[in-house]
Image (cartoon, rainbow, N blue to C red):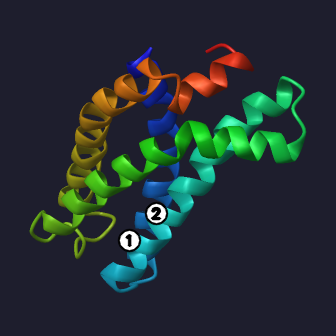
Amino acid sequence: MAAQATLHCLTGCAIGEILGMVLGTAFGLHNGATVVISIVLAFVFGYALTMRGVLKAGLEVGAAVKVALAADTVSILVMELIDNTVMVTVPGAMDAGLGDLLFWVALAGSLALAFALTVPVNKWMIGRGRGHAVVHAYHQH
């Protein structure tokens, strides 16, 4: 269940993270701005995916926002901390262009590491009825 919850979270995070990194790199933004855009988009897409499911289950928008915040905030925070730390610390990754293999390998590796290190966090939270466990009252994966 923890791996499935983390994969769900990774999907939203990856969409936002990749989009943010691509936009920041394509527009030649400073590394700090690129990281901020990536983090914001990861939260937006992560929450949106959860909200989509619980809205389908009939929750009102306000209640769906609360469920998304409760279900995903810690998971997204951990993932974003890990994958952005990797991107910033891999020499040349943030300065590589979109056509550079280094950019894509570092980004893929950062997301894979974020997944691996976030699974235990989600397992711990689910075991205590928190995090993604809140969503399961409203829909199944």
- Point out residue 63 in the picture as x, y percentages from the top left corner: 81, 41
Type of the residue with mark 1: Val
Counting from the top left corner in percent of width and height, residue 14 is at 45, 46
Residue lying furthest left in this view? 91
**Residue 35, numbered label:** 1
Q: Residue at x 69, y 38 (%)?
A: 67
Query: What amino acid is found at the position of numbered circle 2 in the picture?
Result: Ile
From the viewer's perspective, tell me whether residue 69 is left or right of residue 72.
Answer: right
Instruction: Give the image quarter of residue 120.
Output: top left
* Residue nearest the viewer, comparing 138 with 30: 138
Q: Is residue 123 left or right of residue 52?
A: left
- Quarter holding residue 86: bottom left
Instruction: Please tell me whether mark 2 sits on a helix, a strand or a loop.
Output: helix
Relative height, residue 40 to residue 48 (above, below) = below
Residue shown at the point (73%, 39%) measured from the top left? 51
- For the residues labelled 2 and 1, say whether their Cβ atoms are less than 8 Å apart: yes
